[in-house]
């Protein structure tokens, strides 16, 4: 159970880091990219990666809630 909860915590930490990385990418792109097409593609890629990490975190939290509910019910 400890390993499971630690994995959930690591996923949450990863999601927070991807939020920070996306903000960093947006800042860098705004400051250094002059080609709109490149800006759009890179920004969308960063956004999609952050959304994937966000979805993973939500799945992890739902699984955690389910598992903890089963432990309490047992």
Image (cartoon, rainbow, N blue to C red):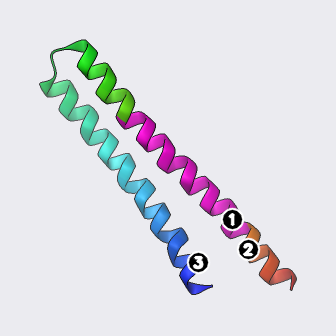
Judge whether residue 54 is colored magenta. yes
From what the image shows, is residue 66 above or below residue 23? below
56 over 34 or under it: above or below: below
Question: Mark 2 or mark 3, which is nearer the start of the sequence?
Answer: 3
Cα separation between marks 1 and 2: 6 Å
Q: Which residue is mark 2?
A: 67
- Would you say residue 73 sits in the magenta stretch? no
Magenta: main secondary structure equals: helix
The quadrant where residue 45 appears: top left
Image coordinates of residue 47 in percent, x first then y, are 41, 35
Q: Which residue is mark 1?
A: 63
3 above or below 24? below
* Picture quarter with the C terminus: bottom right
Residue farthest to the right, as pictured: 73
Residue beneath disc 3: 4
Which secondary structure, mark 3? Answer: helix
- Disc 2 crowd, CA 10 A, few/some/many (<14, 14-19, 20+): some
Disc 3 vs disc 2: Cβ atoms closer than 8 Å? yes
- Report which quarter residue 3 is drawn in: bottom right
Residue at figure coordinates x 36%, y 55% from the top left: 17
- Of the 4 image quadrants, the one containing the N terminus is bottom right
Q: Residues within 10 Å of mark 1 (few under 14, many from 20)?
A: some
Identify the element where label 1 is drawn.
Answer: helix
Left or right of 74 on screen, residue 37: left
- Give the answer, above or below, for where 41 lies relative to 19: above
Residue in the picture at 27% in, 14% down: 37
Query: x and y percent of residue 38 in the render?
Result: 24, 20
Q: Position of residue 73 (x, y in %)?
A: 87, 81
Labels 1 and 2 touching (C-beta < 8 A): yes
Q: Distance from label 3 to label 2 (Cα)?
A: 9 Å
Label 1–label 3 contact, CB within 8 A: no
Q: Where are the magenta residues, as a range?
A: 46-65
């Amino acid at each position: 159970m400890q390993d499971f909860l630690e994995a959930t915590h690591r996923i949450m930490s990863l999601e927070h880091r991807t939020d920070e990385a996306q903000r960093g990418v947006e800042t860098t792109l705004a400051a250094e990219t002059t080609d709109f097409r490149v800006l759009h593609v890179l920004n969308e890629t960063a956004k999609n990666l952050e959304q994937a990490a966000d979805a993973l975190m939500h799945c992890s939290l739902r699984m955690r809630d389910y598992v903890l509910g089963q432990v309490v019910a047992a």
